[in-house]
Amino acid sequence: MIVKNNERIDDLQRCGYGIIQDSSKFCFGMDAVLLTGFARVREGEDVLDLGTGTGIIPILLEAKTPGRHFTGLEIQPDMANMAARSVQYNHLQHKIEIVQGDIREAGRLFAPASFDVVTSNPPYMETRTGLKNPDEARAIARHEILCTFEDVARAASALLRQGGRFYLVHRPRRLPEIMETLRRFGLEPKRMRLVHPFAGREANLVLIEAFRGGRALMKVDPPVIIFSAPGVYSDEMREEYGY
């Protein structure tokens, strides 16, 4: 069975692909779309997505890039199952694998230094801040309940080849901690892009590229503006991201 009760298939507007989602659990957001536009995956490269959820990032990266193979790691069995069924629905079993497991055990699940690119849209909220969603799947996706950013950075560092790239999306307010943690695990921040909901509004997301073993030199890309008016995507979003 591809689709279960309470699930739906959403059109990704890429290559005819769809994704299975259950709104009572957790659905992907614009942050995942932005990350797949920011990440650079070259021909023949192997990619791992940490905390893949519905599998949106591996599926979109397969559609957008010439990467060789994509793997999604997800701790929640029902979410991993949903992601695997989306892979099956799109007939991508030869390009995408979904693995059910813990980010904190990623070093045991995969061979060291076995990926060229690692991506992650990790939980943004520390366990001590914000209102935790009473639904377990949503709470795990949004709060550092099952893993911290340190766990994510440690896994990325262990699994990236020397010179490999780590791409993440997070909240700007945690930038000092993010930068310190990345460098502590040998991941040198090299490129950053802030995301603003509207021009003149405070940034609410940040996209970061870090190199394993890179030298200290950072480039700041021009900001992304999501909306030109309420409910109207900016020209950049329509041209660059297809929305």
Image (spheres, rainbow, N blue to C red):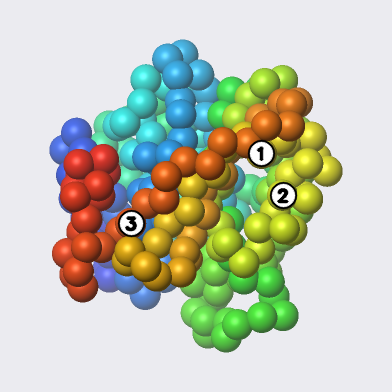
The residue sitting at 74% across, 58% down in the picture is: 177
Badge 1: few (under 14), some or many (20 or more) residues near its Cα, within 10 Å? Answer: many
Identify which amino acid the numbered label 3 is placed on. Answer: Ile
- Mark number for residue 189? 1
The residue sitting at 74% across, 44% down in the picture is: 182
Point out the residue furthest to the right here.
184
Residue 227 position in % (x across, y down): 25, 63
Query: Can residue 110 be seen?
Result: no
Tell me if 185 is positioned left or right of 159 in this view.
Answer: right
The residue sitting at 56% across, 36% down in the picture is: 219
Tell me if 6 is positioned left or right of 118 in this view.
Answer: left
Identify which amino acid the numbered label 1 is placed on. Answer: Pro
The residue identified by callout 3 is: 225
In 3D space, how far apart are the residues under numbered discs 2 and 1 (Cα atoms)? 7 Å
- Mark number for residue 179? 2
Query: Relative to residue 27, is residue 165 depicted above or below?
Result: above
At mark 1, the secondary structure is: strand
In 3D space, how far apart are the residues under numbered discs 1 and 3 (Cα atoms)? 22 Å
The residue sitting at 46% across, 25% down in the picture is: 41
Query: Relative to residue 106, is residue 30 depicted above or below?
Result: below
Labels 2 and 1: the sequence-earlier one? 2
Identify which amino acid the numbered label 2 is placed on. Answer: Met
